[in-house]
Amino acid sequence: MMPRTVLSRCARLTQQVPLESALSGKQSVQRGMSSLSVPPPACMLRPLEAPLRYLFGPGPSNVPPRVLAAGGRPIIGHMHSEMFGIMNEIKQGIQYAFQTNNSMTLAMSGSGHTAMECAVFNIVEPGESVLVAVNGIWGERVAEIAERMGAKVHTLAKAPGGHFTNAEIEQALAKHKPVLFFLTHGESSAGLVHPMDGIGDVCRKHNCLLLVDSVASLGAAPLLMDQQKIDILYTGSQKALNAPPGTAPISFNERACQKMFNRKTKPVSYLLDMNYLSNYWGNDGKPDRIYHHTGPVSGFFALRESLAILAETGLENSWRHHTEVAQHLWKGLEDLGLKLFIKDKDLRLPSVTTIAIPEGYNWKELLAYIMKHHQIEFTGGLGPSVGMVLRIGLMGYNCKKTNADKALAALEDGLKQCRKSKA
Ligand SMILES: *Cc1c(COP(=O)(O)O)cnc(C)c1O
């Protein structure tokens, strides 16, 4: 807690700024003769209120104090040399987290979707063929993104929770001859972690780039960008990385850069054009960095700190820890008589567990009860898994056996209180 005196001094300081500028400005408008037709809203004259909650859903997750503190540091200019230094450190942190030596590594100014669009917009040209593995919402989204920019989209589809064999993938690659194949590593809408081995080789054999979404799995389940021959990999800040939402690490290898920087047409998005972003991140080898957009300075501070925590913990420790806590949760859920949605333990995503909705319950009521009485967020399904699953996410800072026990106790209470009468 900040001492009261400090708090009120801060409050006075922030009030002083508009006051001073109002005083120094021209006093042409008299009080009572305002030309404004919209008055200051009453809510804006009250302080911000945000409740404390246990974020045990699929993200965002609770952010450790150290990361919050980093994000709360005074900001510096987005083009200051110190900021470029911090961006270079972020790059190295991402290279470690992704297990890649790619120099074309950076963080997007935006959420996971920004990275999704950046990858598709920069790699694919209108009219080119794209293959998207759809086994939950993320494939659906990428298919739509690719369609919007004019790609010829083919899908390889399974029900939520399903996964694809390398033979199935290879067949579809041979048939559609795509320039890009998209696969979700941690399918958070279904709770599935997709096997990765050999898929990179299959893609290379068919001269196709492999794009992988690791937003929900990075730091929680093993993934090795270079060794697994992933050409483009992205993640988000707010899941197992435990930074606030709003930044998204991404990396492109040499093959991806070859395609991306030798296109005939400009990418549809100016903001997401890698020609500019690679310069902004100092990845293009040019001596000068030119203003493109103002990156989220505070978000980058926080992201750097979350990557520092991952580096200190060690990736392998982080993977092991997520698996151990998830196994503890899974056992507790089964002891409550619940059925896990993904039957095969090896295919369960350690960061987000999906539970088949138990019979005799309205899942929305159950979640609302748990939120109201335990201040815990669990969620239902998303996209095609809505009405099929409940989701519990224990990632990064939240990934503790004590939190799994807290989640189980809340769920047990909810199951007792929310059962529908048989009448
Ligand atoms: C959460 C999530 C995203 C989307 O991230 P946003 O930050 O909400 O844009 C993408 N892919 C997966 C697998 C996710 O879990």
Image: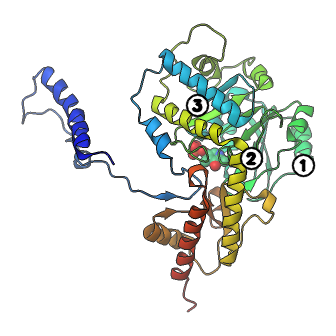
Q: Categorize mark 1 by other alpha carbons within 10 Å: few (<14), some (14-19), many (20+).
A: few
Q: Position of residue 81 (x, y in %)?
A: 50, 15
| Three-letter code, disc 2 | His
Q: Categorize mark 2 by other alpha carbons within 10 Å: few (<14), some (14-19), many (20+).
A: many
Check the image and report above or below for 417 versus 384: below
| Three-letter code, disc 1 | Glu
Q: CA distance from mark 2 to mark 3?
A: 19 Å
Give the total of numbered labels.
Answer: 3
Identify the mark at residue 185; answer none if there is no mark.
2
| Three-letter code, disc 3 | Met
The residue identified by callout 3 is 108
Assign a secondary structure to mark 2.
Answer: loop
Residue 411: which quarter of the image? Answer: bottom right
Q: Nearer the viewer, residue 299 or 161?
A: 299
Q: Is residue 80 left or right of residue 282?
A: left
Q: Are marks 2 and 3 in contact (CB under 8 Å)?
A: no
